[in-house]
Amino acid sequence: MRLLAGALIATLACGPAFAQTGDSLTCGSFKAEAKRDGQLTSWTVAGTTEKGALRSPPRFECLENSALLVEIAFAGGQGTLAVYFSDGSDLTYSRAQVEHRNNRWILPIQAKAHVPPALRAAFDYHCKMDMPLSPIPAGNRGDCVP
């Protein structure tokens, strides 16, 4: 009985930060929801609704109660990761451009300048996307994971 009471208290304590029920998640000021409509799935994030044929339901993740991550796997095989920050900015990458390793998201190093300073340490960064139009400054290479 004590174990059940402890689990209930822990769940209630996490409620405001990570209130997740089924296909919805509340993360700070964000609310994300998904629902199946026939062969299509619709998902709403920050008041904007999108719809598509997905391989699986969208995956919502709350990061430090300040960033909402939305991972989408389209039925055609492509996928995206969108990161919404509490300051109103957001980033979206093809799922092929990001990694999820050891419970951490690894973004291209070029994203670091666009992540709010308070959350930069919450991500890891890779240097795999050194492109002529978006080169990686030599000083940033030290921040990249292998």
Image (cartoon, helix red, strand yellow):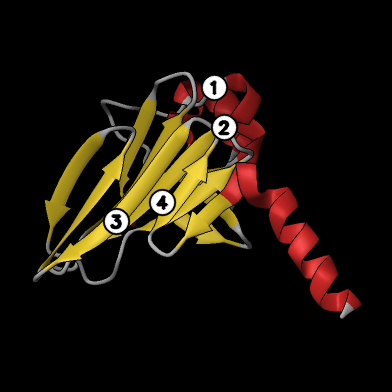
**Which numbered mark, 4 or 1, is in the foreground of this view?**
1
**Which numbered mark, 3 or 2, is in the foreground of this view?**
3
Q: Quadrant of the N terminus?
A: bottom right
| Numbered circles on residues, count | 4
Q: Quadrant of residue 83?
A: top left
Cα distance between the residues tagged 2 and 4: 20 Å
Q: Dot 1: within a 10 Å radius of its alpha carbon, few (fewer than 14), some, or many (20 or more) residues?
A: some
| Res. 98 mark | 4
Q: Is residue 68 visible?
A: yes
Sequence-wise, which precedes: disc 2 or disc 1?
Answer: 2
Local secondary structure at mark 3: strand
Local secondary structure at mark 2: loop
**Which numbered mark, 2 or 4, is in the foreground of this view?**
2
Q: Are marks 3 and 4 in contact (CB under 8 Å)?
A: no
Sequence-wise, which precedes: disc 4 or disc 1?
Answer: 4
**Residue 27 location in percent, x, y?**
52, 40
Q: Amino acid at mark 1?
A: Pro
**Residue 33 location in percent, x, y?**
34, 51
Read off the residue under disc 3. Answer: 34
Cα distance between the residues tagged 3 and 4: 22 Å
**Residue 2 location in percent, x, y?**
90, 75
| Res. 39 mark | none
Sequence-wise, which precedes: disc 3 or disc 2?
Answer: 3
Q: Amino acid at mark 2?
A: Ser
Cα distance between the residues tagged 3 and 2: 20 Å
Local secondary structure at mark 1: loop
Cα distance between the residues tagged 1 and 3: 26 Å
| Res. 66 mark | 2
